[in-house]
């Protein structure tokens, strides 16, 4: 029970940082192309974790056998690479579309991984209880009230954002698969070096690397790289260690709520009655999903 509570707190913190990072991602597009932004932020995230990884490595004597060490290194490499490829695909599509789609509409479509995660879970043989299905419905309704703006129509970038939502759902499932067998900080570090390397290839193919633009974008890159990548995604891997992927997606979708609340607190924006109702529905869905749910999987 304690492990589950700690994991859920980690996921809440992840959602909080993700919500606030939306501003940084939008601001970054004023200076850099989407591929350059993702490459630099991901490399910053990976580099920021290196001191922690080295501390973990040398803080106590390594008593593992060579065989066990080799097996763990293989698992860690597989986990970091698989999570990195899934995250690279999701981040690349989303960041590219953010040049053309409004924040509210983009936030709504991107957070639809809340629907794809249970669909993928069911296809993989997971049995979802009634409370979880109701929670997903409440969160989806709240997401609609919170983010969607009428009359904006549908275009190719909306479809691509929907694809990125599916890819984020895949990333959540991949993280869930590996989070129980690898160290979260080490896996997260590898994940971001993979994302950074793949993004840098796209920079060489489609963009021009501009050092002065990167320096001008230092504040958005710092937050999106070190805080969002280095801290939040590491918390996600840790948080999913003791939480089912569907429940994790319900908590993580609160990023939309935190994005709106961040605008109110930091930028002095106001909330409409519709947005307030959306927050209430989303929070209600998350609370319901965590009220004494006894799933067939024991932790």
Image (cartoon, grey):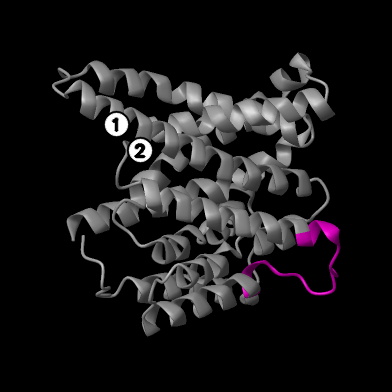
Q: Does the magenta stretch include residue 148?
A: yes
Residue 210 lies, in percent from the top left, at: 79, 18
Which residue is identified by label 2?
184
Q: Is residue 298 above or below residue 134?
A: above
The residue positioned 51% from the left and 30% from the top of the image is: 226
Residue 67 lies, in percent from the top left, at: 22, 26
Quarter of the figure with the C terminus: bottom left
Q: Position of 201 compared to 297: left or right?
A: right
The residue positioned 59% from the left and 33% from the top of the image is: 195
Which residue is identified by label 1?
71
Residue 260 lies, in percent from the top left, at: 60, 58
Label located before the other in sequence (2 or 1):
1
Residue 38 lies, in percent from the top left, at: 66, 33
Q: Position of 155 compared to 215: left or right?
A: right
Q: In this view, does 279 lie above or below 82?
A: below
The residue positioned 26% from the left and 67% from the top of the image is: 297
Farthest front residue in view: 67
Please provide the residue range marked out in magenta: 145-159
Q: In which quarter of the image is residue 132?
A: bottom left
Quarter of the figure with the N terminus: bottom left
Gap between marks 2 and 1 measured at Cα: 16 Å
Q: Is residue 270 magenta?
A: no
Query: Quick check: can you spot residue 84?
Result: yes
Q: What element carries label 2?
A: helix
In this rendered view, identify the residue nearer to me: 60 or 63: 63
């Amino acid at each position: 029970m304690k492990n589950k509570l700690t994991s859920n707190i980690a996921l809440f913190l992840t959602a909080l940082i993700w919500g606030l990072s939306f501003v940084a991602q939008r601001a970054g597009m004023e200076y850099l192309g989407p591929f350059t932004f993702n490459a630099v932020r991901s490399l910053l995230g990976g580099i920021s974790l290196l001191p922690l990884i080295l501390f973990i490595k040398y803080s106590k004597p390594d008593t593992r056998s060579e065989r066990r060490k080799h097996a763990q290194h293989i698992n860690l490499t597989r986990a970091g690479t698989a999570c990195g490829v899934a995250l690279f695909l999701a981040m690349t599509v989303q960041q590219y579309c953010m040049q053309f789609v409004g924040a509210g509409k983009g936030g709504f479509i991107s957070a639809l991984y809340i629907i794809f995660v249970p669909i993928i879970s069911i296809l993989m043989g997971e049995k979802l209880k009634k409370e979880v299905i109701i929670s997903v419905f409440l969160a989806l309704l709240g997401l609609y009230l919170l983010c969607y703006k009428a009359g904006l129509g549908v275009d190719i970038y909306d479809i691509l954002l929907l694809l990125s939502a599916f890819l984020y759902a895949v990333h959540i499932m991949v993280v869930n698969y590996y989070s129980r067998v690898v160290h979260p900080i080490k896996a997260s570090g590898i994940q971001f070096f993979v994302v950074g390397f793949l993004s840098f290839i796209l920079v060489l193919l489609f963009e021009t690397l501009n050092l002065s633009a990167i320096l001008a974008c230092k504040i958005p890159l710092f937050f999106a790289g070190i805080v969002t990548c280095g801290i939040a995604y590491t918390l996600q891997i840790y948080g999913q260690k003791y939480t089912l992927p569907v429940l994790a997606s319900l908590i993580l979708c609160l990023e939309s709520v935190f994005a709106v609340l961040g605008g109110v607190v930091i930028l002095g924006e106001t909330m409409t009655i519709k947005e307030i109702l959306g927050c209430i529905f989303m929070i209600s869905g998350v609370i319901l999903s965590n009220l004494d749910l006894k799933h067939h999987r024991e932790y």
